[in-house]
Image (spheres, rainbow, N blue to C red):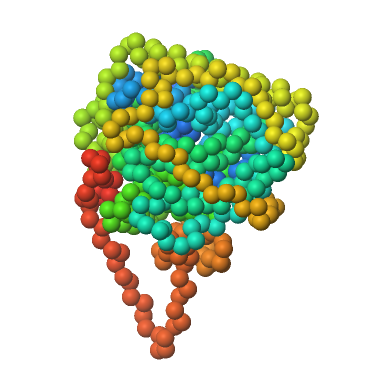
Amino acid sequence: MTAIPMRSALVVPLAALFIGSALLSAQQPPPPPAPDSAPVPGVPPGVEELTRGPVHEAFGRPVVYDPQPGPVAPKDPPPPVEEVPPDEGPAGNNVVWIPGYWGWDDEQRQFVWVSGFWRQLPPDRVWVPGYWSQTDQGTQWASGYWAQVGTTDAQYFPEPPASLETGPPGDAPSADDIWVPGIWLWQANGYVWQPGFWTTGYPDWVWTPASYSWSPLGYVFISGFWDCPLWRRGLLFAPVTVTVVQQKVTYSPRLALNTAYLPYALFVHLRSGSYYFGDYYARDYLQAGYFPWFSFHTSRFGYDPLFAHTDWVYARQHIDWEARLRQVYYARRDEPATRPARLYRDYVRGTVDRGDPALVRPLAELRTAKDLPVKLERIDAARVAAMAEHARATRTLATLRAKWEQERLKELGPGVAAVARPPVKVRLPDLPRFTRSTNVPPLGPRVVPERPVHPLPDLTRKPEPRPAVTAVRPPLINPKIETRPPQPIPKLPGMLPHPEDILHPGFDRRAAHIPRPAPPIAPAVPPVRVAPPVVPHVLPPINGTPHPGHVPLPKRK
């Protein structure tokens, strides 16, 4: 037997050790990145600024035909963040600061602070904030809503029947008309169906149709009202996560959203019935109920007044605006490298290409931006203090609303919100109103138009059972394989399409269905790839507002 030299005897086990370590490390995931020791300037410790997440409910919500109970979180929300309104906001006498609230992120399994924002108030409306309440399954969210000024009682109705809305019966009577969906209305001892109708549209005003908002006590009816268009509705700020929840956090939002680019990154979360913005392009998010807002509109699930108005304005100027939205969505869906970052510090570090105009930018940068639809102005210290006081009154109203609704619910007994019973009235406190110039409509061409003339209820339409709510799986945090959605099915007569059907490239919104493919011709020929239509990068402005169509397509990496 040949003896092994001492040096070889040491080399063999060392080599085996290195090989084993390499194999072991190859089977294990790499270590997590080191935490960022240098915080972003202007951000308190423990606060992480996001470039995606929920949009404040007071900015706007789509109309869900069959509203469902609010989302449930497995734990209680942290103490509210003490917000300090920024000293700069949109110019105008009817602009007010709406405070933020905690929203639950299903994907990250944590609460996200939805930052407050500057809002151009709708005429004769006041904001009633939402709140979290305890249930057997966890903590449940009841959304806020815009109430009529002067309202003294809130009415809570039993669950409305399944919507009978099937979309417009055909083309608009004229280019000036816009569609308003139908809704169930409570009369006497039951619901009657009010059908949809065409009404005159106005470039400076959005008609928000009547809808219902769920609460533990029942469904609050929100009458229709005129609101500001997308480009002058207000100045949104990015949400944040807070890791230091043991103590009160003071934070002044500083990352603003440019509404000129918001349509290209706007989604509707079906479960909560709210807007989300940012990186929700992966196909897995469709399975979790995150749909691009252009696909949600006039689908079987709901109607989006903001999209309907914006699309109507651009269509009157013969601008194929929706085609641009689709191109951006398809590019970001199919090319993960083109999607925007999820954390603002990734932009600060330079790890993300900012060649395209950024949706989320510091307020200091927007002061000189020429593409911002709203005009900014400095806000003096006295007005900032007044806005902070108004925000405190709004948060107090949320606490009172939760207290009074829960007390009334206990008086009526369990299950009262789910049974057919007469509406329940709750006396509201004095709603916090901005006393400077609330309910003073703008002058000139932006005078508030008359309310649309609604058709009479159709007493021949009978209620149908509500569709069952199907549970959706939460999306993967880091999806590696993006499954292909099922092939769409042509729309049946009298039925609205599914949002995934609208995402099909061949979908015809006017016909509300996907054209059936033509039968194959023999002999078969290889398929020819047709390039998508080229949309001009620069489009004409509308009423002096920069058109969002100048957003370039994402660069492929």
**In this view, 527 is above or below 234:** below
Q: Residue furthest bottom?
A: 523
The residue lying toward the viewer, choosing from 164 and 33, is: 164
The residue lying toward the viewer, choosing from 253 and 431, is: 431
**In this view, 516 is above or below 101:** below
The residue lying toward the viewer, choosing from 238 and 263, is: 263
**In this view, 532 is above or below 351:** below
Residue 191 x %, y % = 67, 45
In the image, 423: left or right of 306? right
Looking at the rendering, which quadrant does residue 64 occupy? top right
For the point 75% across and 34% down, the residue is 416
Residue 434 x %, y % = 43, 19
In the image, 221: left or right of 423? left
Instruction: Work out whether residue 245 can be spotted.
Output: no
The residue lying toward the viewer, choosing from 109 and 162, is: 162
For the point 34% across and 34% down, the residue is 447
Residue 60 x %, y % = 45, 37
Instruction: Work out whether residue 435 can be spotted.
Output: yes
For the point 25% across and 61% down, the residue is 534
Q: How many marks?
A: 0
For the point 33% across and 71% down, the residue is 529
In the image, 94: left or right of 192? left
Residue 171 x %, y % = 42, 61
